[in-house]
Every structure is written in C-alpha cells, then in structure tokens.
Amino acid sequence: MFPSSMYDGYGTYSLSLCPNGYKTVQTSIVESSITAAQCCPSGYWWDGVSSDGDVAECTTSYTTPTLVAVSISGQSVMSSVGPGVRHKFMIAVFYQSKDMSLFPAGYVPGSEMLTIATTYIETRTVQVLPSTSQSLAPIQTGASSNLTDLPEGQDGGGGLSVGAKAGIGAGVGVVAIAILAALIFLFLHRRKQASAITPVLETEYFNPLDKPKLDASLGTSKMELDGTSAQK
C-alpha cells in the first residue's frame, strides 16, 4: 500500500506506465524502492511541487495568439489570448525496480512512450500498395503469416479489376435476356399469323353402301312414225 497522503487530490496509478502521447518528465523515489514518475503530454514540462506542497501541472508556452471562449458577465465570447502558457493535468504513476520486467522490452523511464500494445498484436507481414508512384517497402512486424493487404477493388493478378469484371458479367446477362425475349416474341407472332390464313377444307364423305343411280333414259327406245303413210 502507498501512503494515502501522496498526491492528495490527484489520480495515481500503480503499477503503470505513462500513457500514449505522454512522456516521463520527472522521476523520484518516494518510499523505499518505490519510484514515482510524472507524465506530461509531448511538448509540455513539469514545474515540480509548488511552494504550498501541491503538485504542479504540466506547462507549455506559445507565442501565437489563440482564440478562446471566455465568460464575461455570464456570456460566452471569443477572445484572442496570448502569447502565454497552457496547462494540462499531470499524470502520476508508480512502480518498483522489480516491476521493470513486466514492462515492454526496451522501455526506459524518462523516454516518450508512443505505444505499448505492439507486442500483443498478432504479427504478420503487410505489404502496402500506395496509390501514388512513391515506393514503400513491406513492414515486418514479427513472425509473419505471409498475408498481403490489397486496395479495395483490386485482385492479386494482372488484367481487369474486380469491378470491371463484374460490370462485364452484368452486361452479358442483360444482352442474353434481351435476345431470348426477342426470339419468343417472333415465335408467337409467326404462329398467330399462320393460324389466321389457314383455309377451311370441306370434306366429302363416301358411303360404300350407297348404290350408283342409273340414268332412266338409257335402254329405252323411242318410237318414230312413218311419214309416208300420211301422204297416201
């Protein structure tokens, strides 16, 4: 347990490191082998403990006037401030010398920590393919699984892109459907025309039981009168 009086009113973290974007600006032995590290954002310094015993804040200076919102008579207005100084809260962390083995390899108190998560990320080789002519070498992050990240819309080989191939495939499908519809239309149209001009044939039925009818005039002799008997 650490003394509850240390850094009263301020958050303390143990066991911990300075967070990302912060660096160790001051270290001191506070009790036995316990080390206190004061962390400030990059570009800030620590003024140390003030005369009244309070822990000072992280400070930086600036020369270019900056627009800030200030309250005047209960109203918020924008005002140009500067040159001057800025303050941010200091973060205090504690650790012991034996705890150093738990920190990421290569960590040195007092150095700026940009990231501490790289040792826990699954390692692989990523080849970055830039859109410009600038050449970038592959980034080796550890034992690789030989994976390659490619920009969206590109495949691993030469030739057409995935988007172009998809467009060609869709166009061929539309053309095929149009041709099939045209063939069906022509077939139905010709069939309708053929049914409209087909003549209706009259069929004569022959009954084999019907007997042929003979002409009654056949075989009948006509009687002629002699004209000489009338003259006598």
Image (cartoon, helix red, strand yellow):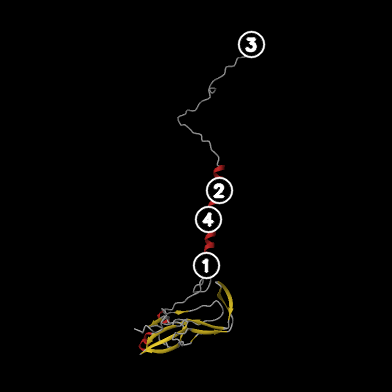
Q: Answer whether labels 1 and 4 touch (C-beta < 8 Å).
A: no
- Give how far apart the Cα atoms at labels 3 and 4 are: 98 Å
Across and down, in percent, residue 88 comes to 49, 81
Q: Amino acid at mark 2?
A: His
The residue carrying mark 4 is 180
Front disc: 2 or 3:
2
- Which residue is at a point 53% across and 54% down the rendered structure image? 181
Mark sitting on residue 189:
2
Gap in angstroms between the C-alphas marked 2 and 1: 37 Å
Quote the CA–CA distance across marks 3 and 1.
Answer: 121 Å
The residue at which mark 3 appears reads as 230
Extreme residue toward the front, this view: 73
Provide the residue designation for mark 1. 165
Ranked by sequence position, the earlier of labels 2 and 4 is 4
| Quadrant holding the C terminus | top right
Q: Earlier in the sequence, mark 3 or mark 4?
A: 4
Residue type marked 1: Lys
The quadrant of the picture occupied by the N terminus is bottom left
Query: Of the residues shown, which amino acid type is indicated by label 3?
Result: Ala
Q: Earlier in the sequence, mark 2 or mark 3?
A: 2
Identified at 54% across, 85% down, the residue is 61
